[in-house]
Amino acid sequence: MQKILVVDNHPLILEFLAKLLAGEDCQVKTAKNGLEALDVLSQYHPDIIFIDLIMPNIDGQTLCRIIRRKPQFKKTYLVILSAIAVETKVDFISFGADACIAKGPFAKMKKHILDVLSEANVISSKKRSGNVRGIEDLYAREITSELLSIKRHFEVVLKSITEGIMEITDNNRIIFANPAAISLCGISEEELLASDFRELFNGGDRRRIGILLERLKDHSSSLNEGVEAVINDRELEIRVSPVNNGKKGAIVVFIDITERNYWHAHLRQREKMESVGTLAAGMAHDFNNLLMGIKGNTSLLLMEMTSDHPHYKRLRSIEKQVASSASLIKQLLGYARQGRDEVIFMNLNRLIGETSEVMARTRRDITIHMELAADLRNIEADVGQIEQVLLNLLINAGDAMPQGGDLFLKTANVSNLEIQSKVFKVKANAYIMLIVTDTGIGMDKKTRERIFEPFFTTKEMGRGTGLGLASAYGIIKGHGGYIEVESEQGKGTSFRIYLPAK
């Protein structure tokens, strides 16, 4: 006894086929649409499936592709029932069907259906021709052709929209997704359709989406506000509207706001750092004046006493502490983009070579690889400040590789058009680029977002002030350049610096 499933949204077709096939000693089950068919197939494994081509809640073409992806239905014989075979070419083989029967007079359809029942038993030895059975008994209808043309037009529009669009049923199952929605979800259409929409989200996002869908049931129109959620590492704004065509369900629109949120966060971060920079500059100048007073008075006292005086060593200690404090003040001024002492034309390669030699001598467990452009353009810069930036980057790279590793230093000449950054808008100019990459422990997202903040450090107490990268940021900005970081936990860190070339 052959097991058969008939999928068609027309009750007369379902009744006709069910009676015909039952009379041929077949076990028959029916479904009114593609979604209902998938529910039946979860517990029923038919030998043959008759599938209407045009129907709601997952059409016949998509249903065939979904079925063909399931290993348990590899040998199931799929037959398309087509009411539009005359108006358009039905390439049923391309989406996995084995045969196609044009819908027409029941007496004519009966013969083709019985032929298919016989053919299904020996299909493995036959080559599918791709011809539609019963097409000779029909004629083209102008109104059907016009409706198909309108349908194709709307399909093109939906495929061209950059926002993701889905249709879900009243129990939240996905029955349509345009290409943008499929791409945002990172799941194939065959896997996406018939799944629970809420399962696309995790944790708190899933709860918020569930609440939004419940609220929609109490509204007859779109909800004004959207819900922000994450799918496939993309930040999305989700908006829902009820389907107003007499059936229950909803239309879901996905708007990708990943870039927008990134720029807003970057703008807030920049404004915060500018404000802190202004505060740091004022504090640095005030502290510098206090230190100068302490240093001056200490020097005057030392001039009036010999080295055997009981307070001599203490005053010398005060002098050293003042000098150490002055170094911190210099870093604060660097963050505030002030205090440039000696600006000259210089070649960065030479400074990189000298600074990396110091690293090579002090950290023999780190292998340094250099790829420096021979024709690197000069820059106009304060040598001391740029050296401070290099030292900070190399020291941080070394700290990120406590067991040793590889350090890569690269320079190149670039134009503003070659700088593809999401962090800043580059001014038109020629630039030199420096990349410092380590193979260390890397950083998580929260650390990356705060890495250039003054006094922020991941080092234990006494090992860092949190001013190193903050001052590097300020110095590079003060030279009209840009600095950005890329990092991932366990995969190392890469700093990119761009400075205007002269």
Image (cartoon, rainbow, N blue to C red):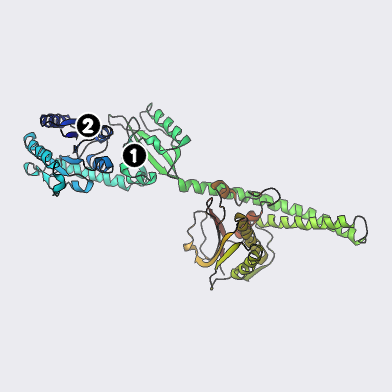
Mark yes or no: residue 130 visible.
no
Q: Residue furthest top?
A: 218
The amino acid beneath tag 1 is Met
Please tell me which residue is depicted at 51% across the width and 56% down the height of the picture. Answer: 425
State the separation of the CA atoms marked 2 and 1.
21 Å
Mark yes or no: residue 450 visible.
yes
Q: Could you tell which of marks 2 and 1 lies nearer the N-terminus?
A: 2
Characterize the local packing of mark 1: few (<14), some (14-19) or many (20 or more) Cα atoms within 10 angstroms: many
Could you say where residue 9 lies in the image, as x and y percent from the top left?
Answer: 20, 33
As drawn, 426 above or below 276: below
Q: Quadrant of the C terminus?
A: bottom right
Decide which of 134, 422 is in the foreground and name it: 134
What residue is disc 2 on?
Answer: 32
Question: Which one is in front in this view, the residue at disc 2 or the one at disc 1?
Answer: 2
Q: Quadrant of residue 190?
A: top left
Q: Quadrant of the N terminus?
A: top left
Residue 226 is left or right of residue 465, and the answer is left
Decide which of 3, 398 is in the foreground and name it: 3
Q: Quadrant of residue 169?
A: top left
Residue 26 is left or right of residue 161, and the answer is left
Task: Kindly state the secondary structure of the residue where label 1 is placed.
Answer: strand
Decide which of 151, 405 is in the foreground and name it: 405
Decide which of 481, 497 is in the foreground and name it: 497
Could you say where residue 172 lies in the image, as x and y percent from the top left?
Answer: 35, 32
Could you say where residue 358 lies in the image, as x and y percent from the top left?
Answer: 66, 66
What residue is disc 1 on?
Answer: 166
Task: Kindly state the secondary structure of the residue where label 2 is placed.
Answer: loop
Please tell me which residue is depicted at 82% across the width and 58% down the height of the picture. Answer: 319
The amino acid beneath tag 2 is Lys
Characterize the local packing of mark 2: few (<14), some (14-19) or many (20 or more) Cα atoms within 10 angstroms: some
Could you say where residue 70 lies in the image, as x and y percent from the top left?
Answer: 28, 41
Residue 459 is left or right of residue 19, and the answer is right
